[in-house]
Each structure stands twice: as C-alpha cells, then as structure tokens.
Amino acid sequence: MHADVSWLLVLFTIGWAGAFLSGLVGIGGSIVNFPLLLYVPPALGFVAFSAHEVSAIGAVQVLFATLSGTLAYWKSSRLIHVRLVQYMGIPIAVGGLAGSYSSSFVPESGIRVAYALLALAAAMMMLLPKRKIEDADASQPEFHTGLAAGSAAVVGVMSGIVGAGGAFITLPIMLVLLRIPTRMAIASSLAITFLSSIGSTIGKALGGHMLLIPSMVMVAASLAGSPMGARLGRRLRAVWLQRLLAALIALTALKIWLDIILQR
C-alpha cells in the first residue's frame, strides 16, 4: 500500500512539474515528462514504463495541461493569436492523429530517436538570431500562412509518434520563422498544442497503449500545475522566458541523445 501511494506521488510530482512548465513557457510538458517518466520510476525502484506507454501517458497529460493553460490565458488576456491557431492547429491535429496511430508500428528505439530529433531541431532553432519583437508592436501580427500550416503538419506527425503536443518545436518556429512576439507565441502555442494533443490522444487510445491510472494522475497534476505556471509566465520578462525554454530543450535533447548513443 505504501509503495502504491509513493508511486502515485512520484507520478503526480512529475505531472505537476511538466504542467507548471507548460503554463510558464507555452510547452505541453512532454519535453519534461517524457524523460522523467522514462527514467525516474525505475531509478526509485518502481516498474519502468515502456517508451510506448510513456508516449501515451504524455499525450493525455499534454491534452489537459494545454487546455488548462489556454483557459488561463484566454480569461486574463488577449495574447492568443486566433488566426495563427487556426492555420497551425488544424494541420498539427491531423498530423498528430496520423503519427500517434502509426506509432504502434514503430519500435521502442524509433520513438526515442524521433523524440531526440525533435528536441535537437528545436534546440538548433533557438540558437538562431531572433528579431526583437515586443508584444505591444502588433495586436495580431501577420505571418506566412503556408509556412505555418506546412510546418505544423510535419511537427504533428513527428510529435504524434512520441505522444508530445509538439509545442517545444512549434514555439521556436513561431519565434524564429514566423516572427511572433514571445508572450503571444507562448499563449498561442498552448492553444495549438491543445488541438494537436486531441489527435495524439485519440491515436494512442486506438493503438492500445493507454494506461488509465497513470493518465488520471497526470491529468490531476496538469489541472493543478498549468494555471500556476501561466500566472507566473505573465509576470516574467520575455527574454527570461526564451532563455528558460532554450535551456529546457537543450538539456532534454542532450540527455536523450546520450542515452541513444550509449544504448541505455
């Protein structure tokens, strides 16, 4: 009984951390939860999740973390770029559904490599120079619609395979390629990732990898953590939010690639 409670507490803590960062920097939380769910439980003596199970749990967590974070931004500000959400949200949702369902046919090593490639691409994009754009410069700035929709579709397929919402790659795309102001990119990314995670969650459920209890624990943690992160994110300077996001992406990419190279 004690072991069961401890196991649930570990899952809740992991879910809360991912959801808090989800609201803070506009990611779905999977960039934190994927490695934590993969490595922390066995390190503490609990049964390890497979990469397929982790990706399924992550899909559910991202769904509720981004929904909670989106509502927090929607109620208190008008930072969500509705047109951008439409152009990126629909392609990424369709791609997420296709990728998540096809992940049933992808080996464990393939899921890790797909995740590592996404994280590496995002880390490299965050190193590119970004034009300084403040949120006050434009209420609904223009962007390249074809680039937005096309990149979202590709990200949707890749992120669907690993159970991620794809925000940790869509955010750099919005900041670097589409030139969206930082806070607007964070708020809009949460809404886009919510749409993406709907397809990913459905695909994982159809693939038969969904675990009910861990998923429910992660949902509860998401509803608690994401609004708290969103409130703090609205108070921090945009430059610090960008640096935090870049550090999270780089560290995660490094960890996953080291494990792949060392075949752990």
Image: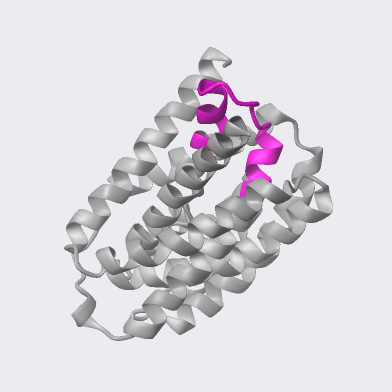
**Colour mapping:** one colour
Who's the residue at 50% across and 38% down the image?
A: 10
Q: Is the magenta stretch mostly helix, strand or loop?
A: helix
As for residue 53 lying within the magenta part, the answer is yes
Q: Which residue lies furthest to the top in this view?
A: 262
Q: Which residue sits at x=45%, y=44%?
A: 13
Which quadrant of the view contains residue 236?
Answer: bottom left
The answer to whether 183 appears left or right of 58 in the picture is left
Please name whichever residue, 20 or 151, is drawn nearer the observer in this view of the structure: 20
Image coordinates of residue 174 in percent, x first then y, are 39, 64
Q: Give the range drawn in magenta.
A: 36-57
64, 160: nearer the viewer: 64
Q: Which of 106/142 is in front?
A: 106
x, y (%) of residue 222?
49, 59
Quadrant into which the C terminus falls = top right
All told, the count of numbered labels is: 0
Q: Tell me the quadrant of the picture where the N terminus can be found.
A: top right
- The percent position of residue 140, horizontal first and vertical second, equals 34, 84
Residue 32: image quadrant is top left
**Image height check: is 237 above or below 52?**
below
Q: Position of residue 15 (x, y in %)?
A: 49, 49
Q: Is residue 154 magenta?
A: no
Of 106 and 21, nearer the camera is 21
Above/below status of 150 relative to 44: below
Q: Inspect this view and state whether residue 260 appears.
A: yes
Question: Residue at the spot x=47%, y=83% of the render?
Answer: 83
* Residue 159 can be seen in this image: no
| Left or right: 137 as drawn, with respect to 191 | left
